[in-house]
Each structure stands twice: as C-alpha cells, then as structure tokens.
Amino acid sequence: MQLSCLPVSFFDDIIQGRMSVGDWAKLGKSLGLDAIDISILFIPDRSLEQARQIRKAVEQAGMGITMMTSYPDFTHPNAQQREAELHAAIHSVQLAAEAGAKFLRVTAGQAHPATSLEDGCRWAIEGLNALIAETAHLGVQLVYENHAKPGVWQYTDFSQPPDIFLHILSHLDQRIHVNFDTGNATAFSPQPLVLLETVLPRLGSIHASDTAQIGALEHVLIGTGKVDYPAIFRCLQQAGWDGWICIEEASHQGEAGVRQAIQFIRNTWQQILLEKNL
C-alpha cells in the first residue's frame, strides 16, 4: 500500500496563494507520505505551463503526484454546456498529464432538477466514455467516483445513490476505473462493504475520508467517525489489493490533522496485515 493525501484542509491557503503546491509537497514528504494529491483548483489559469511548473516544484521536493481531482458535470440539462464540460474535462486530463499525476478523479455530474434519471445516466455514460476515448493516449488513469457535493457545485452528485453509480459504471469503458471514497460510501450506501466488493474488479484507488454521520457527509478527523476502516482494509487485503490510498484530509485541523490521518491509516493497514498473516 502506498499513501498520498488531498489536503482539503489547506485548499483555501493554496488557492489564495498563501501556500504553494511546492510547500504542500515538502510538508507531505516531511510527514512520511509517498506522494501528494492536488485539485484542479490548484491550477487557477488552467494552463499547461502552470501544470508543468507544479510538477517541477513537486519533484524538487522529492515527491510526485498520485491524483488530481476534477469535477466534470456531464449531467447538465443544456447540450451546449455538456459539450463544454467534455472539452474542459479533456483539458483536465492534459493538465494532469503535464503535472505528472497518475490518476484523474472524474464525476458524472450534478443532480440538476431538470435532468431526469434516464437522461442523466445516458449523458454521464456518453460523457465519460467520450472522455476516455479522447484521452487514453495521455497515460492518465481515469477513476470515477460518486461524490457528495463539491464546493464548486450547486447540487449534489447525480450518482451519489449507489444504484445509479453502479448502473453508470456498468456501462463505462473498462479503461475507466473506480475511486472508492470511504466517507461517501459510509454516509450514502446502506451496505458500504457490499459496494466495495462490487467495484473491487475495477478499483483504481481509495479516497480515505471519514464522516460523523450516516445519511450525510460530515467530514471529521479520519479514524474518529463512522467509517469501519478495519473491515474495509480487511476486504482489500483479502482480495489482494495493494494500491494507492489517497487520504482526503478535510478535518480542518491543519498539519496535525494530516499527521494523525497518516498515522491512523498506516497503523490500521499494518494491524490488519498482521492479523491476516497470523
């Protein structure tokens, strides 16, 4: 298992320029991460040159980028906007490639009131399949997640309900994998472990997050909420999965929150590994 982190707690500092991505990479390295994660929001002008500069700064810190998160909205009721979303998503993959990211997190889109279930599923499938067809040659692995509600969206994720998520996934190009978010699954799936077992054959990465509630995503310090990490890690290890766990650190406790999340994930993973080998 390798560990990276998306520093949601530092988003405002990085977006407002009070903290650089290079600073984040240096901090991540000092805390023992194997790599860092970034958001597309860290590239405000969306230029390939800025993405290259981020890659240079991260590599100078002795780190790499595992995942870049993005927020395509393929379920928008306006056809012209859906076309614009596809072009923007293609550019996001190009940015991820220039930044050196291994994965790009993608979404289906928002639950727009004017979008029906049938149309939303169809448009999400069409958009994501078109995206992989246009960008597979760039070497960035697309990982599809059923999100909650990103700050840049007006509505919740169209595919937040597990049945919609799995329906869309079943119609996606096999080159698109899954980013399984532990907090989202615990908050919104009646059986998060069953959902994990269902997507395991296409699992690309794990977002390690935690929630204080069932039925709503309320980020808390990882290891203090409702997510059953021992059960999740037991499921992963029994399946022989040993990939990237990308911490989504959103407790807003700064460096201390990141440090505690790293320690909790590593310690819990190792405890289950020892249990498995007994």
Image (spheres, rainbow, N blue to C red):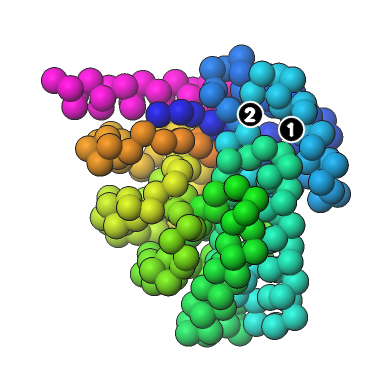
Residue 223 placement, left or right of 152: left
Q: Please, what is the three-letter code of the amino acid marked with disc 2?
A: Gly
Residue assigned mark 2: 64
User: Bounds of the magenta span?
Assistant: 251-278
Residue assigned mark 1: 55
Residue at point 48% right, 24% down?
Answer: 262
Is residue 96 visible in this depiction of the protein? yes
Residue at point 42% right, 66% down?
Answer: 169
Magenta stretch, overall SS: helix
Tag 2, which secondary structure? loop
Residue at point 29% right, 57% down?
Answer: 198
Residue at point 58% right, 41% down?
Answer: 102
Q: Alpha-carbon neighbours of circle 1 within 10 Å: few (<14), some, or many (≥20)?
A: many
Q: Please, what is the three-letter code of the amino acid marked with disc 1?
A: Arg
Residue 102 placement, left or right of 14: left
Is residue 164 visible in this depiction of the protein? no
Q: Within the magenta stretch, is there residue 36?
A: no
**Where residue 34 sits: x, y (%)?**
54, 24
Q: Nearer the viewer, residue 182 or 96?
A: 96
Tag 1, which secondary structure? helix
Residue 67 placement, left or right of 61: left
Q: Alpha-carbon neighbours of circle 2 within 10 Å: few (<14), some, or many (≥20)?
A: many
